[in-house]
Image (cartoon, grey):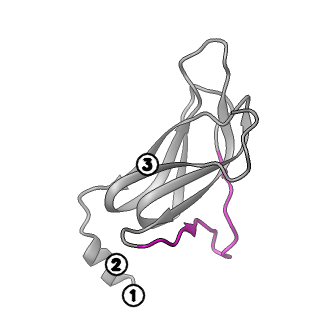
C-alpha cells in the first residue's frame, strides 16, 4: 500500500446502469495502530456495454479532484454537481495517510427509471 504504483484504483460493479449522485468515504477503521485513509481521489465511470471510461469533470471539463478524509472515522460526503449514469465506478487515490486504504459507499437511485431520465436529457 505505501509503495502503491500510479494508476491504482478500486472499482464497484452495480450490475446494471444506475443514477449516481455522490460518494461517501471513510478511512480504515479496524486497527488502533494503522491510521490509513485517502485524502484526495478522482472518479471514473462507464455504462453497461461500453469499454470506454469517463472521468468525472467539472463544468470546464477539467478532471475533478475530490477531497477525501482527514482521519479514519468521520465520513466525508462528496455530492456530484451533476449526477451520472453508470454501471461501473472507480476511485483513483491521489494522496493518502500511510496507504491508500478506504471504505466507500456509492449514493444513487436504484428505482429510478433510467430510460425516462436519459431520454429527457437529450
**Cα distance between the residues tagged 1 and 2:** 7 Å
Q: To which residue does mark 2 refer?
A: 118
Identify the residue shown where x is 54% and y is 39%: 25
Residues rendered magenta in the picture: 50-67
Check the image and report above or below for 55 versus 101.
below
| Percent coordinates x, y for residue 13 in the rendering | 39, 53
Question: Residue pushed farthest top?
Answer: 32
Check the image and report above or below for 4 versus 64.
above
Q: Is 53 on the left or on the right of 98, as rendered?
A: left
Q: Do the CB atoms of the residues marked 1 and 2 lie less than 8 Å apart?
A: yes
| Percent coordinates x, y for residue 48 in the rendering | 36, 68
**Cα distance between the residues tagged 2 and 3:** 20 Å
**Element assignment for label 3:** strand
- Residue 79 lies in the magenta-colored region: no
Quadrant where the image shows the N terminus = top right
Quadrant where the image shows the C terminus = bottom left
Which SS does the magenta portion mostly show? loop
- Mark 1: few/some/many CA within 10 Å (<14, 14-19, 20+): few
Residue 111: quadrant of the picture: bottom left
Q: To which residue does mark 3 refer?
A: 106
Amino acid at each position: 500500500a505505501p509503495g502503491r504504483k500510479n494508476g491504482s484504483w478500486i472499482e464497484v460493479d452495480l450490475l446494471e446502469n444506475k443514477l449516481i449522485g455522490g460518494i461517501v468515504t471513510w478511512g480504515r477503521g479496524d486497527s488502533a495502530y494503522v491510521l490509513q485513509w485517502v485524502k484526495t481521489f478522482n472518479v471514473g465511470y462507464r455504462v453497461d456495454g461500453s469499454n470506454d471510461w469517463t472521468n468525472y469533470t467539472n463544468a470546464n471539463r477539467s478532471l475533478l479532484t475530490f477531497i477525501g478524509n482527514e482521519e479514519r472515522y468521520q465520513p466525508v460526503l462528496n455530492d456530484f454537481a451533476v449526477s451520472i449514469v453508470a454501471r461501473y465506478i472507480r476511485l483513483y487515490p491521489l494522496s493518502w495517510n500511510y496507504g491508500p486504504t478506504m471504505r466507500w459507499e456509492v449514493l444513487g437511485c436504484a428505482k429510478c427509471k433510467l430510460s425516462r431520465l436519459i431520454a429527457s436529457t437529450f
